[in-house]
Structure formats: structure tokens, C-alpha cells
Image (spheres, grey):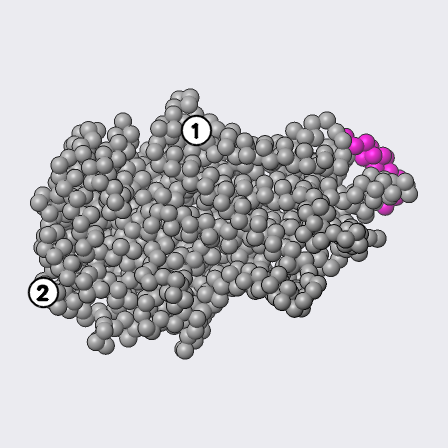
């Protein structure tokens, strides 16, 4: 809590925080209201007297119904979760081990290996997806979730590795040395001392890796073809934008419902890692 | 060969393996194997293929002969390409500065104890979680010249008397995509930096406070140096992602009006996919590489220096 | 039409690959013709998702099952957003795997012809049977004199306008020339009812306006040889100058970056009086007459009429979205796919689809112009000539890959957009000339 007078608390804490929350969340409120707004109210120009941006008098569930009954939205949601979860786990596994090795161990070419892994992250996806399509075909992965589960790590691993390197470096060396003096092997020290301390880092790398796969568009568009395999971003844009007609209600409902479940899962993790940490450092 | 997953129970066989893993070099090799396999399998070939594409004269379905740097020469003389280069730098620079500043501010706010902390922390992640394509559609709707809620709000508050043509004016279109990018990026900075702040022992702060340091001094001399490694990594990743941004601009403006908002990636896409000039598209994508590499090297050197200090 | 939910439907018929596998045995048992059915090939058909949802429904519910029964094959229809078709085509060709039939827009045949199966016999037969293939479809779908895609339909772009508003501004029928259009537009804009037109980077409405507008003034990108750039002509400069003034006088200036959907919304919300568009505005207003009403409380659809773009000094032109189907060379089901194309293009089957479009799509052969659909609704009448009056990009040359490059770089559109934003006409034209020369070099 901010120390000092009440006005200081307001000026330095409550007001800025409220502004942040308002700006960051306003688009979501906008999606929410569009989701429930009947189509008749949607097309009101901003300078019309009947423009009601923040409220609707006749909320409707039609758009949500459309989303679930006329499209395979729930299936897309499941696909996206599944793909994102598995590819995140793979990438975290590789990233934590790699990040530990690169930041904590002395071995020849450590620096250039780290840079090498990093460089793969620089390769633009817009360039990669065409040759990658060839690989997907050769491995017979087309139109299967594995096409994405195995390709997403190409941009997730460098990211996780480097993020973990940052976190591992912040952990004091003494911790590990103490454990080693007590007779732990290197591996044990890593598994039982360093990794637990780095849990917040791992969680946040995980959160971001998950988000990146959740977000991905172009690979999902190109490598999947049947409707029931698609992910949320691809499914929603390919079913709810028809030429020059946007189905705004269902589109916004899809955007909202496609992000809120994840936010709830995150809220659990965020709290978990934030509270768990201080103790482990002190201990 | 040793395996990467190692049960730490003390069985006889595993003992010898563990001994091998006491050697830092072997351990490092083992730990890096899964990464090497996946990246080697899925990125090495496409990358080489991409480089070859950029040096040949291929179109979709028509492999072309080797032409050296001709494609690069062509794009170098392309006015739209130059605009795209400039746009990319401008876009990356501005958004990164804002994201860092606002993200750090938010992280410091969230590092305090207050009621409903958990909910707020989860809620502010939303802009980052939502698939870019979909949130950009929502923004597009908010910027729509006919239906803009932003115009409505500014008008009601008395800031404007006529509408602002958000996506229609070249400069405003650029501003619009910058706003959306910052909006999307703040949570990433805030949460990463928050996690970084959490690793800093509160005792250091307390000690400094006892010594009579003001909050600002405590931040500058205690918190900030410890936060710097994480900050640099976060900035690095953000810069790369922003530099190679595609979805946001593609959905929002498609590079228009009059090519005013093209970035490397969107222009490469337009040429490579839209026109079928694969080689030229690959060349534009790859032209991003030296720029990125330069930025990254500078940042990496800086990180090293910070760490040595 | 009874509303079967899409999801239930897919589950029931196995609209996708996974469902097909799972339901294989049950399907065989149900159909009662096990051995032959078990060896059917599956044709994967990738097309855009239609502006008219009912048409996709019709394909899924009625036409494709009928085709499957008649031809003894499985058809797997995938519909995606039109913007996303090209990455799919590119990746499919480069990796040699993907859908068997893919919808092509405009002149894509020129970009991909090396990877396509020639369909001349199919197309020529179609033309012969139905009174001749329109020149536009021929130019767009063939390279040299070989067809590489099967013309499907032309999505006409016409000016949708508000009859009563134009009457109030003194135009009892739609102005025939650009000059007259500008005069009416001036009055309309003064009343807060401007003309809406996009000059943004959209695949439909912006080039659909800019190209025919250029031609109607006598400007052209290249000579008939398809090489010599002649954009920098007196005619082009005239057209740009007129456009700049026309824009200020009569247009909604927000249109610079509209996408293909903005003008629909603006029109339906009564902020603009006229706009170049497909029939989607009208169709939307028909679908929800209670929702879209005029300021007098009448259903708006009664107040919407369509017109081709006005005439210029050099004539009257249109540019419309060409849709055709490409049969991919890598496909392992070429004969099945060809059979299916033939089947769906029989007059009887195609008519069902055509009717579901309610005039939105204009077929590519001459006989369809006489179809009674065009007389049923005066608002839709103008669309019947879309395929006949259209001209291809890259005029006066063929719509080659170069023309497509100029198109995807939005050079003609941007030439006008730049001028409208204040660049002197001569300079804007010079810029376009430079860009075109680079492309045609």
C-alpha cells in the first residue's frame, strides 16, 4: 500500500490503476455489449441521436445461440485448448532444460548456441509457412492437430529458453552451491532447488507460450482444412465473415468466449505464482 | 545416450548416468537435445528453403533458376518497400517505448497489496490473451468512421466537433495501429516485469528504506538494476514480435490507405502470396533479418554489459 | 426453409473428414450398397463462404448429397473467408497437397496455370450448351486459348442507391454520366447524404470502382501487347483531376480506408446515399425489412435500386468479381473432381444454386440472361448484364500475372487515393506510371 496521506494514495495509486484497467478492458466491454445487442441497434452511426454505445435496451441471446448452434465453436475452443496446452508443455520442457544449460553451465560454444536458438526466433512466419507446408505433407500431418502441436514450438522454444535464461540468472548462485555442498548432484540441485525457485518464471513463460499458440493464425489457417479441426481464430473468421458481411454479434461473442475461459485459468496461476514466490526465495 | 528425464532415485544403473551428468558439458548436451531435435526438424529446412527462394526467380508452382541478389535489388528500388521499412521502424520504436513505460508503471502498481488484486491481475491479461485477429476486429469496429464509439466519446466530451477519420488518414491509420499494439502489449510487459519484481527480495527494499532512501531512489538504485535482466529480455522479445507483426495490420488496414501502414510482413505477404511472386516475397521477409539481427545484437551486447556489471 | 442447425447437419452427414471416417460403416450400411461405396474417392472442394448463407446451406444439404449419390463419391466442402484463399492455394501448390478443387477469384489462373489441369473441353462444352461463354469469363479463366479453370459466376458490382433521395435531389433516374452524377452528388452531400466509395486496400469495392472509372475516361494501364505502359496519358490525368473534385464535392471523406464491409454498414445506417457494391446491401435489407427502415419508417428495401457505373468520355465499363474453379494438378482425384464439376454445371443443378443467389451471382454463359429471375425484381435487373459488360484488369493487354501484381499493389486505387489526399494529379499519375513500369519491366 502506498504510504502517506489519502490524496497521495489516490493520485499515485487508485487513479492510475483505474485508468489502466478502464483502457485495457474497454474493448472487452465493447465486445460484451455487441454480443448482446440486437442487430437492429448495431447499425446506428455515432452522431445519430439513437446511438447508445454503452447500453442496450433489448439484450438478446441470439448471437450466442448462433455461435453454438450454427458453428462448431465449442469444438474449435477445445481444439485450441488442446493444441495450445500440448505445444506449451513441449516448449516449456525444452525451454526450461535449455535455459538452465545455457545460463548455468559452462561448456564450449554456450554463447553461440544460445544465439543460434535465438536466431530461429527471428525468422518471420510469413516466410516459413510455405516450406513448412511441405514438411507437414511429408510427415503426413496435414489437417491434424499435430501439424500445429509440432510446429508451434519452433517459435515457442526460443522464446521460453530465453525467458528462462533471464529468470535463472536472477536466482542467486549461492542457493545452488549450498545444495551441492550438502551432497546433491547437479541434476538434483537443478530439479529440487533451482527449478522450484524459478516456478514463477516457468509459469509466466508458460502463460505467454500458451497465449502465443492460442493466438497463432497463419499456420492454423494453412495446415488445417476440415471445419472440426480448426482453431478459434481461424474458425471464427472463416465462418462469421462472409465476403463483405460481418456477423458482428457472433464474431464478438466468439472473441469474448474464446478469451474469458483462459483468463480464468490464468487468474489461478497468476495468484499462485505471485504468492508462492517470496517464501521460496527467503527459505 | 543419456535421457533427459532423470528419476532422481538412487538406483544402481542411474548412478553411473548421474555421474556422467556431473560433467557440465554432458549435462548441457543432454539438456539441449530436445530443443535441437525439434528446431532442427522443423525450422532448419524451411529456413534454408526460404533463403534459396529469395535468391531465385520462383513463382507459385514454378521453381525458378538462381538469380543471386536480383530480388533484393528490385525491392531496394521499390518505393512501397522503403515506406514499409520506415513504417516498421517507427511502429516498433514508438510502441516499445510506450509499452515499456506503461507496462513498468502497471507492474509497480500491481506489486502492491490491495483488495481484489487477484482479479485485477487476471483481468488486465485479457488484451494479451485474446486472439489478435479477433481483438483487432473489435478495434476496427471501434475505429469505424461511421460507428466509432471513440469519436462519440470525444465528441460528447467536447474535444472534437467533427469526426476523426481514424483509419482513412495515413498518419491517423498508423497511430491507430500503434494504439492497438500498445494496448495488446502492455499486459505482457506488466506481468513479466511483475514476475521479475517478485523475485526481488523485499529485505533489500526495507534495508534501503531504513537507510532513508526515498521511494524514487529506492526504485532507481535497488529495484531497477535487479529488474534489468528480465526487462531486457522482455524488450527484446517485444521488439522482435512487433518488428515482424502481421496479423494486426493485415486485419486493421491491409497496409492501406495508399500503402501508408505496410510493414515488412504485410508487404511480403502481399507480394509473395497475393501476387504469387514467392521469391520477391521471401526477399522482403528476409530483408527484415539483417535489421532485426542488428537490433538484437545491440540489445544482447547491452544485456551482457548489464550482467557483468 | 426449415432450419437445420449446421452442426447437427455436419454430424449427420459427415460433412468433414473426421466425421466421414467415424460414420463410414454406418453410412455404408444405411446406403445399402456396400462394396462399391466403400471405395469411393473423396473430392475436397475449397471455396469462399458465400455472401448468401442460404447458398452454402443449399450445397451442403441438398446439392452435394445428391451429387454424392449420383456420382458415387464423397464431397468434402470447405468454406473459408475469401481473403484467406490465397495462402491456402500457395501452400497447397508449393507442397503438392491440398484441396482438389479450389475457387479462384478474378485472374488467379494466370498466377497458378502451371499447377492447374486444363479444363478447355469442359468450359467450351458449357459455352456451346448455353448460348456462348462471355468474353470476360474467357479472358479471366484462360491463358492463351486454354481454359485453366471452370467459370462459375460473376459477382456483379453495381451502384446501390436510394431512389427517394435521388428524386429529392432532382434525379428521377440514375445519372448517366460522371458529370451528372457529380452534380447530383453535390446536392446530396449538401444534405448530409454523400456518396460512399472506398479507396482503401480491399479486394472488392475499391478496384471495382477505380479500374472501370479509369477505362471510362479512356485511360489504360498498358497497350494491347501487355508490355508498354501507357498510364501517363492526358485521359488518365483528366480522370484523376475530376476524381479529386468529385471526391470533395460529393463523397463521404471517411471512405479512404473503408474495407468491403464499411459501405454496407454506412448505407444501411442511412449515412450515404449511393455506393458501389455487390447486391449484399439489398439482400441484407430484404432479409430484415423491420430492421432497416427509411427515415419515413418504410422498409428500406423498397427504396434501393441498382445501376451500373456512369459513362465517361470513353464509354461505360464495369469490373466484377470473377469466380471459377481450379482443378489442381497435384490432385489424385482429378477424374472424380471433373465429373463433379460437370455434374454441378448441368443446367438443372446449377439453376438451384443460381436461384438461391437471387441474382447476386451472374452466370457466365449467355442464356442465363434470359432467366425469369431477372424480371421478378426490378432492383436486381441491372445485374443480369454484369458478366457481359465487364472488362478485365490489365486492359488493353491480357490479365496477366503482371496485371495481377499491379492489382495486388493497388496501384490504380492508390493513384486516386493519393490525389484525393492532396497530391497533384500529374504527380499521382507519374507515381503510378513509375510503379507500373517497374512491374512490367
- Residue A154 place in picture, x, y as percent: 58, 40
Q: Quadrant of the C terminus of chain B?
A: top right
* Numbered disc 2: secondary structure: loop
On screen, residue C297 versus residue C169, left or right, reads right
Q: Main secondary structure of the magenta part?
A: helix
Whether residue C176 is situated above or below residue C143 in the rendered picture: below
Q: Position of residue C48 (x, y in %)?
A: 35, 52
Res A56 quadrant in image: bottom left
**Letter of the chain that mark 2 sits on in the rendering:** C
Q: Horizontally, is A281 left or right of A123 in the view?
A: right
For disc 1, the marked residue is: B54
Question: Which one is in front, A171 or B59?
Answer: A171
Asked whether residue C422 is in view, the answer is yes
Please give the chain letter of the residue carrying mark 1: B
Tell me the distance, in whole angstroms, between the alpha carbons under discs 2 and 1: 58 Å
- Residue B304 left/right relative to C239: right
Numbered range of the magenta stretch: B9-26
Dot 1: what SS?
helix
Q: Which residue is mark 2?
A: C170
Amino acid at each position: 500500500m502506498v504510504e502517506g496521506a489519502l490524496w497521495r494514495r489516490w493520485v499515485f495509486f487508485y487513479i492510475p490503476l483505474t485508468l489502466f484497467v478502464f483502457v485495457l478492458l474497454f474493448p472487452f466491454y465493447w465486445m460484451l455489449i455487441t454480443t448482446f445487442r440486437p442487430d437492429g441497434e448495431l447499425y446506428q452511426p455515432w452522431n445519430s441521436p439513437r446511438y447508445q454505445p454503452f447500453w442496450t435496451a433489448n439484450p438478446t441471446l441470439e448471437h450466442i445461440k448462433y455461435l453454438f448452434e450454427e458453428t462448431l465453436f465449442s469444438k474449435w475452443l477445445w481444439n485450441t485448448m488442446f493444441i495450445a496446452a500440448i505445444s506449451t508443455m513441449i516448449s516449456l520442457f525444452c525451454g526450461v532444460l535449455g535455459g538452465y544449460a545455457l545460463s548455468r553451465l559452462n561448456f564450449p560454444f554456450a554463447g553461440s548456441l544460445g544465439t543460434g536458438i535465438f536466431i530461429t526466433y527471428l525468422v518471420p512466419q510469413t516466410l516459413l509457412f510455405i516450406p513448412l507446408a511441405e514438411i507437414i505433407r511429408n510427415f503426413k500431418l496435414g489437417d491434424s492437430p499435430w501439424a500445429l502441436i509440432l510446429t508451434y514450438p519452433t517459435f515457442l522454444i526460443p522464446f521460453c529458453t530465453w525467458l528462462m535464461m533471464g529468470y535463472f540468472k536472477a536466482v542467486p548462485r549461492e542457493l545452488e552451491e549450498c545444495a551441492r555442498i550438502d551432497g546433491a548432484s547437479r541434476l538434483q540441485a537443478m530439479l529440487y532447488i533451482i527449478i522450484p525457485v524459478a516456478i514463477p518464471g516457468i509459469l509466466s513463460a508458460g502463460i505467454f507460450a500458451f497465449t502465443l499458440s492460442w493466438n497463432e493464425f497463419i499456420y492454423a489457417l494453412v495446415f488445417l482444412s476440415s471445419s472440426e479441426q480448426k482453431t478459434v481464430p481461424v474458425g471464427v473468421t472463416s465462418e462469421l465473415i462472409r465476403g463483405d458481411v460481418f456477423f458482428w454479434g457472433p464474431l464478438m461473442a466468439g472473441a469474448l468466449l474464446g478469451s474469458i475461459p483462459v483468463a480464468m485459468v490464468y487468474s489461478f496461476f497468476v495468484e499462485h505464482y505471485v504468492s508462492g514466490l517470496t517464501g521460496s526465495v527467503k527459505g | 545416450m543419456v535421457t533427459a528425464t532423470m528419476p532422481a532415485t538412487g538406483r544402481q544403473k542411474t548412478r553411473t548416468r548421474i555421474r556422467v551428468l556431473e560433467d557440465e558439458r554432458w549435462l548441457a548436451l543432454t539438456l539441449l537435445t530436445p530443443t535441437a531435435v525439434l528446431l532442427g526438424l522443423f525450422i532448419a529446412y524451411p529456413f534454408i528453403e526460404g533463403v534459396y527462394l529469395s535468391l531465385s526467380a520462383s513463382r507459385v508452382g514454378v521453381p525458378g533458376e538462381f538469380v543471386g541478389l536480383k530480388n533484393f535489388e528490385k525491392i531496394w528500388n521499390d518505393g512501397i518497400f522503403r515506406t514499409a521499412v520506415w513504417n516498421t521502424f517507427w511502429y516498433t520504436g514508438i510502441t516499445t517505448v510506450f509499452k515499456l513505460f506503461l507496462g513498468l508503471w502497471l507492474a509497480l502498481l500491481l506489486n502492491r497489496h490491495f483488495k481484489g488484486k487477484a482479479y485485477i491481475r487476471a483481468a488486465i491479461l485479457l488484451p494479451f490473451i485474446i486472439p489478435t485477429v479477433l481483438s483487432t476486429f473489435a478495434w476496427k469496429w471501434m475505429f469505424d468512421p461511421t460507428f466509432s464509439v471513440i469519436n462519440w466519446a470525444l465528441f460528447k466530451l467536447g474535444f472534437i466537433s467533427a469526426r476523426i477519420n481514424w483509419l482513412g488518414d495515413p498518419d491517423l491509420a498508423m497511430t491507430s495501429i500503434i494504439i492497438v499494439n500498445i494496448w495488446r502489449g502492455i499486459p505482457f510487459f506488466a506481468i513479466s516485469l511483475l514476475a521479475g519484481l517478485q523475485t526481488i527480495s523485499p529485505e533489500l527494499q526495507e534495508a534501503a528504506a531504513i537507510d532513508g532512501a526515498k521511494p524514487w531512489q529506492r526504485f532507481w538504485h535497488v529495484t531497477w538494476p535487479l529488474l534489468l535482466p528480465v526487462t531486457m529480455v522482455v524488450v527484446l522479445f517485444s521488439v522482435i514480435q512487433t518488428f515482424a507483426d502481421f496479423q494486426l495490420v493485415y486485419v486493421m488496414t491491409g497496409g492501406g490507405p495508399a500503402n501508408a501502414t505496410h510493414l515488412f510482413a504485410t508487404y511480403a505477404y502481399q507480394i509473395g502470396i497475393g501476387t504469387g511472386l514467392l521469391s520477391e516475397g521471401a526477399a522482403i521477409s528476409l530483408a527484415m533479418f539483417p535489421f532485426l539481427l542488428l537490433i538484437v545484437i545491440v540489445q544482447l551486447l547491452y544485456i551482457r554489459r548489464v550482467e557483468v556489471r | 426453409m426449415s432450419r437445420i442447425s449446421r452442426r447437427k447437419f455436419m454430424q449427420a452427414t459427415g460433412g468433414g473428414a473426421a466425421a466421414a471416417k467415424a460414420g463410414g460403416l454406418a453410412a455404408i450400411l444405411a446406403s445399402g450398397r456396400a462394396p462399391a461405396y466403400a471405395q469411393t474417392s473423396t473430392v475436397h472442394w475449397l471455396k469462399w463462404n458465400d455472401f448468401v448463407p442460404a447458398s452454402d446451406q443449399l450445397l451442403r444439404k441438398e446439392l452435394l448429397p445428391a451429387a454424392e449419390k449420383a456420382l458415387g463419391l464423397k464431397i468434402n466442402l470447405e468454406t473459408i473467408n475469401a481473403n484467406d484463399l490465397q495462402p491456402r492455394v500457395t501452400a497447397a501448390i508449393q507442397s503438392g497437397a491440398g484441396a482438389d478443387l479450389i475457387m479462384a477469384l478474378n485472374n488467379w489462373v494466370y498466377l497458378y496455370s502451371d499447377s492447374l489441369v486444363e479444363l478447355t473441353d469442359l468450359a467450351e462444352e458449357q459455352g456451346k450448351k448455353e448460348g456462348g461463354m462471355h468474353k470476360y469469363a474467357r479472358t479471366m479463366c484462360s491463358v492463351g486459348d486454354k481454359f485453366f479453370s471452370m467459370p462459375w459466376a460473376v459477382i456483379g458490382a453495381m451502384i446501390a442507391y436510394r431512389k427517394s433521395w435521388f428524386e429529392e435531389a432532382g434525379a428521377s433516374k440514375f445519372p448517366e454520366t460522371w458529370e451528372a452524377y457529380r452534380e447530383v452528388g453535390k446536392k446530396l452531400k449538401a444534405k448530409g447524404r454523400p456518396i460512399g466509395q472506398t479507396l482503401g486496400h480491399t479486394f472488392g469495392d475499391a478496384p471495382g470502382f477505380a479500374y472501370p472509372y479509369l477505362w471510362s475516361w479512356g485511360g489504360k494501364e498498358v497497350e494491347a501487347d501487355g508490355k508498354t505502359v501507357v498510364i501517363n496519358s492526358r485521359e488518365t490525368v483528366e480522370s484523376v483531376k475530376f476524381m479529386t473534385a468529385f471526391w470533395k464535392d460529393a463523397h463521404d471523406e471517411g471512405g479512404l480506408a473503408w474495407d468491403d464491409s464499411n459501405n454496407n454498414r454506412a448505407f444501411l445506417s442511412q449515412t450515404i446515399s449511393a455506393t458501389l457494391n455487390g447486391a449484399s446491401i439489398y439482400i441484407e435489407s430484404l432479409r430484415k425489412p423491420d430492421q432497416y427502415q427509411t427515415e419515413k419508417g418504410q422498409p428500406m428495401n423498397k427504396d434501393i435500386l441498382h445501376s451500373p457505373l456512369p459513362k465517361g468520355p470513353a464509354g461505360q465499363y464495369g469490373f466484377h468479381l470473377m469466380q471459377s474453379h481450379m482443378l489442381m494438378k497435384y490432385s489424385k482425384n482429378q477424374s472424380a473432381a471433373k465429373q463433379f464439376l460437370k455434374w454441378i454445371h448441368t443446367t438443372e443443378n446449377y439453376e438451384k444454386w443460381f436461384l438461391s443467389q437471387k441474382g447476386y451471382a451472374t452466370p457466365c454463359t449467355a442464356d442465363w440472361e434470359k432467366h425469369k429471375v431477372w424480371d421478378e425484381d426490378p432492383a436486381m435487373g441491372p445485374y443480369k448484364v454484369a458478366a457481359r459488360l465487364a472488362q478485365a484488369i490489365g486492359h488493353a493487354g491480357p490479365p496477366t500475372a503482371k496485371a495481377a501484381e499491379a492489382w495486388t499493389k493497388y496501384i490504380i486505387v492508390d493513384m486516386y487515393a493519393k490525389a484525393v489526399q492532396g497530391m497533384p494529379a500529374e504527380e499521382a499519375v507519374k507515381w503510378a506510371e513509375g510503379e507500373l513500369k517497374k512491374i512490367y519491366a
